[in-house]
Image (spheres, grey):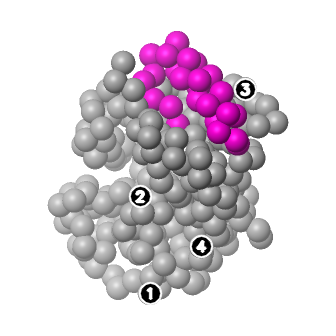
Amino acid sequence: MNITFENINILGHVVFESHQYKHIHYPEMLLRYDSNFIEFKKSPSLTEFKSAENYLRNYHLKNGQKHVKFYFPANEKPAVEILDYMNQSGYAIGFLELYTIQPHQFPFVINNPDIVIDVVTDKNFEAYLEFQYQQDLEFGSEFANQKIELHKRNFEDKNILQLIALYKGNPAGSVDVIISKETAEIDGLVVDENFQKKGIGSRLQKFVMEEFHDKTIILVADGEDTPREMYRRQNYQNHGYKYHADKVYEN
């Protein structure tokens, strides 16, 4: 199976599409940058980028949104003049990396009785929501509250499996798994900072490998963040990169 960024789930609706780009919008969560952006189908010229920037800025202003975000074509670095313009204009520029693994390739994980992985059900949903809320507060209470509503929608989605990790009975980590016919996407893997380096992230992934042993496991990682090194050590294979850039306006 040939895995590309097209296999990665996008939370949002296509509200406009041209030969140049797709405009993704998610009114249910306007603060989520990864659900409100423009994705270029082909590398733009500087003039084309500025035109798209102006369009998105005006669209977001009408919805009270203070950011703009752009994704560039997979495995292509933006042109030098665009990078220069974005750097001069105050954009944060980064890139994502796409990883896959076959479940049997995941390393052996030593069992730790202090760590329990549970599927989120009616019985533990409130604990899961509280854990997520505390994790998201660093982005502000408004974002955290909007995220709670997203978790509630995901809970009702038969194609999303929510998992929570307990360490000595305390909520310590979580992950969502987005299920399709041939893949299972690891999304939003998080371990509370008070419980890191205890093997919780590995146990969450191992659960996914066992639960979806007949699918290709996929995920995206920040190309400049430390988890990507963990994924490489765990035998994940890199399948490409994608540049992105965002800017937040003060008013």
User: As shown in the figure, which amino acid type bears the numbered disc 4?
Assistant: Asn
- Distance in Å between CA atoms under marks 1 and 2: 19 Å
Q: CA distance from mark 3 to mark 4?
A: 31 Å
Question: Is residue 161 part of the magenta span, yes or no?
Answer: no
Query: Which amino acid lies under the numbered mark 1 shown in the image of this protein?
Result: Phe
- The residue stretch that appears in magenta: 44-69
**Nearer the observer, disc 3 or disc 1?**
3
> Which residue is found at the position 34% from the left and 24% from the top?
250
Locate the C terminus and report the quarter of the image it occupies.
top left
Q: Residue furthest right?
A: 19
Q: Tell me the residue that label 3 is attached to.
A: 16
Mark 3 or mark 2, which has the lower sequence index?
3
Residue 8: give x, y in percent of width and height.
63, 53
Cβ atoms under marks 1 and 2 closer than 8 Å: no
Mark seen at residue 189: 2
Horizontally, residue 95 falls left or right of residue 203, namely right
Q: CA distance from mark 3 to mark 1?
A: 46 Å
Q: Residue at the location (59% across, 47% down)? A: 81
Residue that label 1 marks: 108
Q: Earlier in the sequence, mark 4 or mark 2?
A: 2
Q: Secondary structure at mark 2?
A: strand
- Asked if 55 appears above or below 20 in the picture, the reply is above
Residues at circles 3 and 2 in contact by the CB criterion of under 8 Å: no
* 65 is higher (above) or lower (below) than 174: above
> In the figure, is residue 96 to the left or right of 43?
left
Q: Amino acid at mark 3?
A: Phe
Residue designated by label 4: 238
- For this view, does 244 lie left or right of residue 170? right
Q: Amino acid at mark 2?
A: Leu
Image marks 3 and 4: residues in contact by CB distance under 8 Å = no
Q: Is residue 63 magenta?
A: yes
Q: Residue 69, position in %: x, y?
A: 52, 37
